Amino acid sequence: MITLPEPVAFQGDRGNEQKNLDQHGVSAQEIEEVFFDPRKKLLEDRFHSGTEDRYILLGQTRQARFLMVVFTIRARRVRAISARDLNKKERRLYEEAT
């Protein structure tokens, strides 16, 4: 199981926020909601971790939308890199974990 340090806040990135909204229809608020899903599934993104650790979060928003969020933590702040709807395989992984 992966344990992350307790972040104190979310760090916005206007470029990534607009990209996620334009390409996948995911708002910054929805991204934050996934972090509070008690059934979320957290994975290390070893393939894309280079100069910093990256993580993959599978979870659900308050409106029952299932999302995948790629993020990093900088100075105890969560910085979302990308977010999109879960595909079938990811949805199964999420459901098996819960």
Image (cartoon, grey):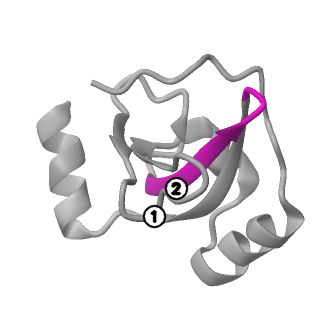
Q: Above or below — where is 7 with respect to 64?
A: above
Circle 1 sits on which residue?
48
Where residue 51 appears, as percent x and y from the top left, is 60, 55
Where residue 50 appears, as percent x and y from the top left, is 53, 60
Q: Main secondary structure of the magenta part?
A: strand
Q: Above or below — where is 41 with respect to 69?
A: above
Circle 2 sits on which residue?
70
* 18 and 7: which is toward the camera: 7
* 9 and 86: which is toward the camera: 9
For image coordinates 58% across by 50% down, the residue present is: 71
Q: Could you tell me the amino acid type at mark 1?
A: His
Badge 2: few (under 14), some or many (20 or more) residues near its Cα, within 10 Å? many
Q: Residue furthest right?
A: 14
Q: Is residue 75 a member of the stretch shown in magenta?
A: yes
Q: Give SS at disc 2.
A: strand
Where residue 78 appears, as percent x and y from the top left, is 69, 38
Contact between marks 2 and 1 (CB within 8 A): the answer is: yes
Q: Above or below — where is 13 with respect to 3?
A: below
Badge 1: few (under 14), some or many (20 or more) residues near its Cα, within 10 Å? few
Q: Is residue 32 a member of the stretch shown in magenta?
A: no
